[in-house]
Image (spheres, rainbow, N blue to C red):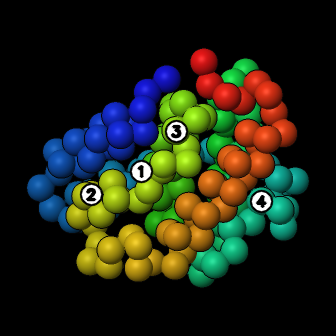
Amino acid sequence: MNSIDAITNEIVAEFERFDTVDEKYVHLFALGEALPSMPPGLKTEANKVHGCQSDLWFRLSCEEGRFKLQADSDSLVIKAIAALLVRVVENCDPADLPSLNLEFLDQLQIWKLASERNNGLLAMLTHLKQRAADLMVESEGCHGE
């Protein structure tokens, strides 16, 4: 497992390869399109992220000491951002998740509004952190290795 910083630095470096915002968006959208659709039965009220203008669902679970995140949205942009979060969450040590922030999204330089001022992004982060905290309490096996 990698640290959140290592994973987010890898994502930032990946986006730095692109010269224009348009190229970055093409890559971001490709990531969103590659994210598997969430089964309809998991699109529950408990998994819905409230505070996001688009419909967005996160299902965070713990399997063999690691988080597993499924995500889906009716918005390609939101689904693409969710795909980045899936990548971070599924590869980090569960104990590191409370330190997750969205600064790495600002470093991608794909929009003008800072992530801490975007209610939808904050809603994503709050939802993930709350569910992770719940899982850490519920599941003795989700404490990393």
Residue 61 spot, x, y in % from top left: 75, 40
Residue type pointed to by label 2: Leu
Q: CA distance from mark 3 to mark 4?
A: 21 Å
Q: Quadrant of residue 123?
A: bottom right
Residue type pointed to by label 1: Ala
Q: Which mark is residue 96?
A: 3
Q: Is residue 63 above or below residue 118?
A: above
Q: Are marks 3 and 4 in contact (CB under 8 Å)?
A: no
Q: Give the residue number, with chain letter if any, for mark 1.
A: 30
Q: Is residue 74 left or right of residue 17?
A: right
Q: Residue at x 41, y 73 (%)?
A: 116
Residue 71 spot, x, y in % from top left: 65, 52
Q: Which mark is residue 47?
A: 4
Count of residue discs = 4
Q: CA distance from mark 2 to mark 1?
A: 15 Å
Q: Residue at x 30, y 63 (%)?
A: 106
Q: Is residue 27 left or right of residue 89?
A: left
Q: Give the residue number, with chain letter if any, for mark 2.
A: 108
The answer to whether any part of residue 37 appears in the image is no
Q: Quadrant of residue 79?
A: bottom right
Q: CA distance from mark 4 to mark 2?
A: 27 Å
Mark 1 closeness class: few <14, some 14–19, many ≥20 residues within 10 Å: some
